[in-house]
Image (cartoon, grey):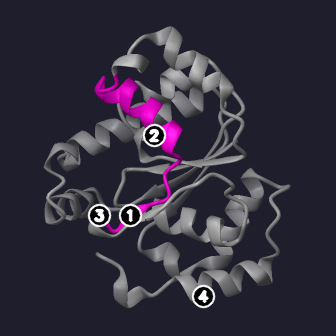
Amino acid sequence: MLVITGTGRSGTSIVAAWLKKCGVIKYDCEWIPQFNSGFDTPDVARVNSAIWLGNDLPLQSIPAQTTAIKAFEYDIIKDPKFFYGNVLNTWLSVRQDMKFLICLRKFSEVEKSRLNLSQLAMARKPQELENDLGKFMNQLIFNNIPFEFIVFPKFTDQYEDVYNKIIKLYPTIDINMETGRKVWDNLIDTSKLHL
C-alpha cells in the first residue's frame, strides 16, 4: 500500500490529484476548494481522525480501529494524519505492507498556510512539527518501512523525481512516464499554488 502523507499543507493533495487523474486512485474523493486541498481516502481519514483526535465514537476503541485498518484493500491512500499522534503506530500494529511518500514543507510555512485558511485547530508550531517528524521517522526507520521524501513547492517543478520515487516505492503502478508527465503538466499551475 502506497501512503501519501506529510505535514498537511505540503503538497499531498497535488500528488493525489495527479494519481487520481492518471487513473490509479480508485476510491471516490474530491477537491475541497475552501481549503485548497482534498483527495483524502474518506474511510481512512475517518479512522485516522478517530485515532488522532478521538472524534468518532464508533471508532474510538482500538479493536474497532484495527478491524477497520485490516479491512482496507487500497493500493494507494492519501491522508496527512499519518504524520500525527499515534496514527502510524496504530497502523503498524496491524499491517506492515505500507510504503510512504512523504511531502514536506518548511514548518513555518505549514503553520502560516494553516492560519491563512483559518484552520486553527490543525495549526501547529514549527517546533511541534519537528517533534512530529522525529516521532514519525523513528517509527518508519525502526520498523523497516520504505519511504521517500519530496519537498513542496520545489517538487512541482521536478516531475521526474516525483515519478521515480513513486516507481521506487510502487514498481507495478500503472503510469507511463510520458503519459504521467502530460497529466502533471496539465495539473500543475504554479501561479495558483498557495505558498
Which callout, 1 or 4, points at the residue further toward the start of the chain?
1
- Residue 64 lies, with reference to residue 7, above or below; the image says above
The magenta stretch is 36-56
Q: Are marks 2 and 3 in contact (CB under 8 Å)?
A: no
Alpha carbon distance from label 3 to label 1? 5 Å
Which callout, 4 or 3, points at the residue further toward the start of the chain?
3
Q: Which image quarter: residue 152?
A: bottom left
Q: Which residue is mark 4?
A: 185
Residue 15 magenta? no
Q: Are marks 3 and 1 in contact (CB under 8 Å)?
A: yes
Q: Which residue is mark 2?
A: 45
Amino acid marked by disc 4: Asp
Is 190 positioned to the left or the right of 139 in the image? left
Find residue 109 and report its horizontal and vertical position in percent.
24, 64
Q: Nearer the viewer, mark 1 or mark 4?
A: 1
User: Which disc number belongs to residue 37?
Assistant: 1
- Residue 9 lies, with reference to residue 132, above or below; the image says below
Is 110 positioned to the left or the right of 148 in the image? left
- Residue 94 lies, with reference to residue 35, above or below; the image says above
Q: Residue at x 29, y 27 (%)?
A: 55
Which callout, 2 or 3, points at the residue further toward the start of the chain?
3
Is 9 positioned to the left or the right of 161 in the image? left
Amino acid marked by disc 3: Phe
User: Which disc number belongs to residue 35?
Assistant: 3
Crowding near pointer 1: few (<14 within 10 Å), some, many (20+)? some
Question: In terms of secondary structure, where does tag 1 sit?
Answer: strand
Amino acid marked by disc 2: Ala
